[in-house]
Image (spheres, grey):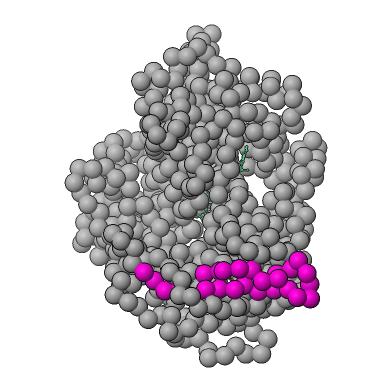
Amino acid sequence: MVLAMFVRKFSSLRVCVVGSGPAGFYTAEKMLKAHEGAEVDIIDRLPTPFGLVRSGVAPDHPETKIVINQFSRVAHNERCSFFGNVSLGSSISLSELRQIYHVVVLAYGAESDRVFGISGEELKGVHSAREFVWWYNGHPDYSKFTPDLQSTDTAIVLGQGNVALDVARILLRPPKELATTDIATHALDALRESSIRKVYLVGRRGPVQAACTAKELREILAIKDLHINIKEADLLKTSADEEEMKNNRIRRRVFELLSKASSSAAPHPSLGQRELHFTFFRKPEKFLESSDRSGYVDGVNFEKTTLKGSAGSGNQIAAGTGQYEDLNCGLVLKSIGYKSVPVDGLPFDHSKGVVPNIRGRVVSSSDDAQTEDGLYVCGWLKRGPTGIIATNLYDAEETVASISEDIAKKKLTSASSKPGREGLSQLLENRNVQVVTFTDWEKIDSEEKRLGSLKGKPREKITDWNDLLQVTTK
Amino acid sequence: MFISKISRLVGAQAFKGLPKAPITIRSKRSFFPLVQNDYFEPSSHRLFSTTATETSPEENEEAQKISVTFFDNDGEREIKVPVGMSMLEAAHENDIELEGACEGSLACSTCHVVVMDVEQYNKLEDPTDEENDMLDLAFGLTETSRLGCQVIAKPELDGLRLALPAATRNFAVDGYKPKPH
Ligand SMILES: Cc1cc2nc3c(=O)[nH]c(=O)nc-3n(C[C@H](O)[C@H](O)[C@H](O)COP(=O)(O)OP(=O)(O)OC[C@H]3O[C@@H](n4cnc5c(N)ncnc54)[C@H](O)[C@@H]3O)c2cc1C
Ligand code: FES
C-alpha cells in the first residue's frame, strides 16, 4: 500500500517518444534510467519497431542489426510501452499528445527525399534510394513498388555515400548470396531476374571527397568477380585535397582504398562480368527521356565539374565547367539525402529539413530562442539524415540532458498530473485505432523467423500491411 | 549473450561435479553480486585447476586474471579480468557502462575505449582493417583508441587503464584534447 503510493507519486512523469528507431529507443532507455518515476511510451506509425534498423540497414549487414536485442530489452522495461500502428498526424495530433504527456520527444526520422529539381526527374525509372531500400527491406509502404530491372543492363546511382554504396552492392551482389539474408522475397525474385550488369556510382566531387566510409567501400570492392573501374586521372590530388585529407582520417582511408582498387583492377572486364564504375566530377544536368519508350528514362546528361576552394571552410565545392556528357542507363537511383517531413503545429526549417532546436529543445520561431515547453527532438529529425546508429546514442544523451535540466528547473512537472498512457489508450480506442503492442510485434517476429527458417533465411519479412496486422490477432 | 554464457559455464561446472567456487568480492564495488567473476573463467582454466596439484586453486586463479581500471564520469573502478576475456564482456559483468550495440561483432563502434598509457597501448596487437574501419566512426577518437570488444585480456596487460568515451568527453572540457589519428 505504502509502496503503491510511493510508485504512483514517482510515476508522475509521463513521457511519449514518437518514432521507434535508434533515436527513439536510445531516448527511451536514457529517460528510464535518468528518471526512476518516468513512464515512457513509444509510438510508431508502423506495426514493427526499430525504424531504419529494420527498413534501412542492408539485409547483408546482420551484425549491425544486433542492436535490436538492446532495444527489445528497453521495450520490456515495465515502465515502457510500445504503441505500433499509431501515426502522429493521422491517429493523433501533436497538440493532443502534448496535452496527454509532460514530455513529448519527436524522433520520427526522415521519410522523404532531397530532390535535384532538374528536368526529367519525374520520368519512370528514376527513383530515390530511399524507395529502393524500403522495397528490398520489405517496408509495408513499398511492397507494391516494382522497379524495372529487366529492360536495361545499366543503372546510375547518383551520390557516393554509404546508402549509395548499399544500393549499388544490392544490385551487383550475386543473388544467391542475398538469398540467405532477410531481404524481402519480392526483391530477391526481381534481383534474380535482373539484367543489370553495370552500375555507375556518380559523385559531384572527387575521390578525396567521397562521402562513404571505409567499411562500406571495402565491402563493395570485395564483391566476387566484379570489375572495378576508376579513372587514374581522377586520382590525382591537388594540395587542397592533401589538406582535406590531412585533417580527416576517414577520407584518407577511403582514398587509399580507391587508389589500391584502381591500381589492382584489370584493364577490361571479362566477358559477362559485372562492372562497378566510380565516376567523379559529374553533376546531373537533366534526365533524358527514351525516344522509343515515352515517359521512361534512358540516360543522364552530366556537367563536368572542377573543385573550387570555398572561402574559409577548407572544404572544396564542385563548380560546373560548361562541358557536358551523356551516360545511358535504364534505371536511376538518387542517393543525395533523406529529408524529414513536418507535422501540424511543429516548427520546421524547410530548407534544412529539420526541426529547429537548441540541444534538443524545439525552438518556436527562428528569430528568437524561445523554446516550446515539453517538446523535444532527437535523431535524424533533429540533426538531419547523417551519422550511424551510434550517433543517435550521443544525440539522445544530449536531448535527455536538456529534459533533465528542465525537470530540475520544475519547468515540466509543475503542471498538474497528466493522463499519459491511459489517456493515449483511451483516445486511440475511441478512434478505433488497432494498436500493435510489443507482445503483438513479438508474434510478428516469431512468425517471420518461422517463415524464414523454411527458406534458410534468418527471417522472412511480412511486407503487407494487412498481413502484418492479421498476424497480431492470432 | 551473457546469459547464455553464464548458464553454459555454470552447467559445465555442475556436470563436472566441481565444488562451487568460493564467493569472493574482488572489485572495489560490486554492483552485480549475483554474478561472480568465478563463473566466467575460460573452461580451459577449469580443466586445468582440476588436474593441477602443485599450485593451489586460489593462486592459480589470481595468475589467470589481470587488473583493469575503468575511468568514467563517476570516477574509477578496478576489476579483475580473466585472461582471454574481452574488455566489453568484463565491463558488462561488472556493471560498468560500456555500450556494446553489436555485442562484439565489430559493427558498431559504441564499445570505444581509450587506452590511457601509451606503453600499454603498444602492447596490444595492431587493430585489424575491420577494427580501424569501425574506429573511423568512433566518437572522440584519440591516438590510443581501441574497441573494447577487440581488446582481450592477457598477462602483459595487467594494470591496464581504460577511459570510457563519456569520461573523455569530460576530459575535453578540462583541457585534455583527444588528438585525431
Ligand atoms: C539505407 C540506410 C542504411 C543504413 N545503414 C546503416 C548501417 O549499416 N550502420 C549504421 O550504423 N547506420 C546505418 N544507417 C543510419 C541509421 O539507420 C540512422 O542513423 C538511424 O536509423 C536514424 O535514427 P532515427 O531514429 O532518427 O530515425 P529512423 O530510424 O528512421 O526511425 C524513425 C521511426 O519513426 C517512425 N515514424 C515516421 N513517421 C512517423 C509518424 N508520423 N508517427 C509515428 N511514427 C513515425 C518510422 O516508422 C520509424 O520507425 C543507415 C541509414 C540508411 C537510410
Ligand atoms: S560492440 Fe560493436 S564494435 Fe565492439
* Closest to the observer, B29 or B34: B29
Quadrant into which the C terminus of chain A falls: top right
Image point (72%, 41%), residue name = A443
Q: Residue furthest left?
A: B175
Q: Quadrant of residue A133?
A: bottom right
In the displayed structure image, the side of residue A43 where residue B48 appears, left or right: left
The part of the chain drawn in magenta is A283-308
In this rendering, the answer to whether A208 lies above or below A13 is: below
Q: Residue furthest front?
A: A322
Residue B20, how many percent across, how many down?
44, 42
Residue B134, compared with residue A23, is above or below; it is below
**Residue occupying image coordinates x 51% and y 38%:** A348
Q: In the visual, does B152 lie left or right of B173?
A: right
Quadrant in which the N terminus of chain A appears: top right
Q: Image height check: is A187 above or below B28?
A: below
Residue A97 image offset from top left, x and y in percent? 59, 25
Q: Using the image as rendered, state which of residue A265 and residue A312 is in the foreground.
A: A312
Q: Is residue A306 magenta?
A: yes
**Residue at 58% across, 20% down:** A100
Q: Residue at horizontal 50%, vertical 86%?
A: A265
Question: Secondary structure of the magenta portion, mostly?
Answer: strand
Res. B93 image quadrant: top left
